[in-house]
Image (spheres, rainbow, N blue to C red):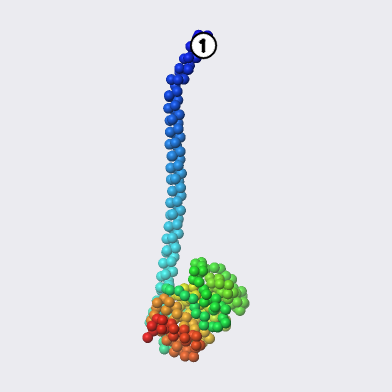
């Protein structure tokens, strides 16, 4: 019995002696666990940062591509404006190189081979499409060209394109009227489709495109019932691009060529000429 008590005391003493060491081991384990947790958190943060860097690199690539695309479009627009300005300035060589003929005393002649915004003014009373265009908002325009399919019948195709205008879908209306000119260039409504296309560009603040379309209209359809108004809106497009000299030339040509144009057209031309101080 005495031996048993002695052994028990010896074991208890050994445990007491070992307790500080065990406590230190637990502390070490806790410290290691905390360090491991911090390492895992740091690794997780680093992984998240790496993912974010990859996302930013992709965004930069996309933005770089978009900048290059816009720069190309701006360059193309400037070339088109230079060509149109050459026509209006009577620079025969430059105009011929761009596929145009010059502006003479009788107005814009010959076939065509190839800033601040604001909607067009409604000059035709009772025209629901013109009324809709006058309310156009450039902010609603889509940067992407939508897909449209015209009916085979040219009259049905024109009504189809007009339906987009009446519903306020300007991107599709623009695509449809542009396609109409390609599909039915000799149809009796081709001139009106071209005019509508120019109005859409003007309504959406796409003044360079509007100028090109209206220039084509006045050259290709000199006897169209809306020829005077096409001149007016061609001048308006240039005025909105702060091309005062070209705009004044067009307005003066319109008044000389169409002295009996409708009063709203003549009044609007006088207003635009006064606004940009035509001499």
Residue depicted at 57% across the width and 70% down the height: 148
- Residue 179 visible, this angle: no
Quarter containing the C terminus: bottom left
- Residue 38 visible, this angle: yes
Asked if residue 162 is positioned above or below residue 110 in the image, the reply reads: above
| Location of residue 168 in the rendering, given as x and y in whole percent from the top left corner | 56, 72
How crowded pointer 1 is (Cα within 10 Å; few <14, some 14-19, many 20+) is rated as few
| Location of residue 261 in the rendering, given as x and y in whole percent from the top left corner | 49, 88
| Location of residue 255 in the rendering, given as x and y in whole percent from the top left corner | 45, 88
For the residue pair 256 and 268, the one nearer the viewer reads as 268
Residue furthest out toward the bottom:
260
Asked if residue 31 is positioned above or below residue 156 in the image, the reply reads: above
Asked if residue 1 is positioned above or below residue 155 in the image, the reply reads: above
Asked if residue 102 is positioned above or below residue 28 in the image, the reply reads: below
Q: Name the residue under label 1.
A: 4
Residue depicted at 39% across the width and 78% down the height: 243
Residue furthest out toward the top:
2
């Amino acid at each position: 019995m005495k031996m048993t008590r002695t052994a028990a005391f010896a074991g208890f003493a050994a445990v007491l002696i070992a307790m500080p060491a065990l406590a230190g081991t637990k502390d070490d384990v806790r410290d290691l666990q905390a360090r491991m947790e911090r390492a895992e958190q740091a690794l997780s943060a680093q992984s998240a940062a790496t993912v974010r860097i990859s996302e930013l690199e992709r965004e930069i690539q996309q933005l770089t591509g978009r900048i290059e695309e816009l720069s190309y479009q701006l360059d193309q627009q400037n070339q088109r404006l230079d060509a149109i300005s050459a026509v209006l300035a009577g620079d025969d060589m430059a105009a011929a190189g761009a596929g145009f003929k010059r502006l003479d005393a009788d107005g814009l002649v010959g076939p065509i081979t190839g800033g601040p915004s604001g909607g067009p003014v409604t000059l035709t009373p009772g025209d629901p499409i013109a009324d809709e265009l006058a309310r156009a908002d450039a902010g609603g325009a889509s940067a992407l060209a939508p897909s449209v399919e015209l009916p085979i019948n040219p009259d049905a195709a024109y009504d189809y394109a007009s339906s987009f205008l009446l519903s306020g879908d300007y991107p599709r209306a623009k695509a449809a009227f542009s396609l109409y000119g390609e599909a039915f260039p000799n149809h009796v409504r081709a001139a009106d489709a071209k005019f509508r296309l120019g109005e859409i560009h003007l309504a959406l603040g796409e003044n360079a495109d509007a100028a090109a379309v209206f220039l084509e209209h006045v050259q290709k359809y000199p006897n169209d019932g809306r020829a005077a108004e096409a001149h007016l809106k061609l001048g308006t497009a240039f005025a909105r691009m702060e091309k005062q000299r070209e705009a004044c030339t067009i307005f003066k040509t319109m008044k000389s060529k169409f002295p009996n144009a409708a009063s709203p057209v003549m009044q609007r031309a006088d207003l635009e000429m006064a606004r940009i101080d035509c001499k």
